[in-house]
Image (cartoon, helix red, strand yellow):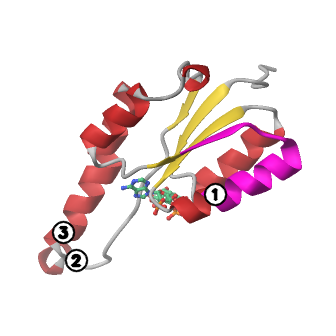
Amino acid sequence: MISVKNKIVFITGASSGIGESCGKIFAQSGAKLILVARRQEKLEKLAEELTKKFTTKVYLLKLDVRDRLAVESAIHSLPEPWKDIDILINNAALSKGLNKLHTGDFKDWEEMIDTNIKAYILCDKM
Ligand SMILES: NC(=O)c1ccc[n+]([C@@H]2O[C@H](COP(=O)([O-])OP(=O)(O)OC[C@H]3O[C@@H](n4cnc5c(N)ncnc54)[C@H](OP(=O)(O)O)[C@@H]3O)[C@@H](O)[C@H]2O)c1
């Protein structure tokens, strides 16, 4: 089995759900984590938990992954020890609106396309 001990894992959407769970599993296995989301306080709470439980090294990025310039700048500005990312968990996503297409809200579609497609490709490219 491949070890992730001391590997740098970059997790988008780490403040809840699948991303948060991935953070816990990788922390348990000894990885170092870059945790990304918009809700800083959630990231801080998770970081505190992981540091206490597993002495995980954690770097937090409060980031809206739809903001291309902010994503580029954050990744290019990572401190030296965090620059060589080994694993990307490209997870930040959402689903909005359960309306039928003809009654749907264009803003919901835009937000989903910007997050689930455009930001996904951007994070992968970086
Ligand atoms: N849970 C399931 O069983 C399941 C099954 C199939 C598919 N999915 C899909 O998988 C995705 C994740 O599911 P989940 O249950 O983990 O959802 P979730 O708990 O709502 O988590 C979504 C994560 O994405 C982040 N995020 C959303 N927009 C962002 C943005 N613009 N910039 C940065 N981070 C952003 C959120 O962080 P912030 O709000 O803090 O930014 C949050 O951490 C969703 O699209 C869901 O539809 C889930």
The residue that disc 1 covers is: 44
Q: Residue 21: say if magenta.
A: no
Density class for disc 2 (Cα within 10 Å; few <14, some 14-19, many ≥20) is few
Q: Residue at x 32, y 43 (%)?
A: 119
Residue 107: numbered disc: 3
| Label located before the other in sequence (3 or 2) | 2
Three-letter code for the amino acid on which mark 1 is drawn: Glu
Instruction: Mark 1: give few (<14), some (14-19) or many (20+) Cα within 10 Å.
Output: some
Secondary structure at badge 2 equals loop
Q: Position of residue 118 (x, y in %)?
A: 27, 43
Q: Main secondary structure of the magenta part?
A: helix
* Percent x, y of residue 86: 59, 21
Label 3: state its secondary structure. Answer: helix
| Mark linked to residue 25 | none
Gap in Å between the C-alphas at discs 3 and 2? 14 Å
Looking at the image, tell me whether mark 1 or mark 2 is earlier in sequence order.
1
Q: In this picture, which residue range is highlighted in magenta?
A: 44-60
Q: Give x and y (percent) for residue 43.
A: 60, 56
- Please identify the quadrant where the N terminus is shown: top right
Q: CA distance from mark 3 to mark 1?
A: 30 Å
The kind of residue on which mark 3 rests is Lys
Marked residue nearer the N-terminal end (3 or 1): 1
Tell whether 119 sits left or right of 101: right
Query: Which mark lies nearer to you, 1 or 2?
Result: 1
Q: Which residue, given by chain and number where applicable, does mark 2 sit on? A: 100
Residue 50 is inside the magenta segment:
yes
Amino acid type at image mark 2: Lys
Relative to 37, residue 82 above or below: above
- The answer to whether residue 16 of the structure is visible from this angle is no
Left or right: 121 with respect to 5?
left
Q: Is residue 123 visible?
A: yes
On-image quarter of the C terminus: top left
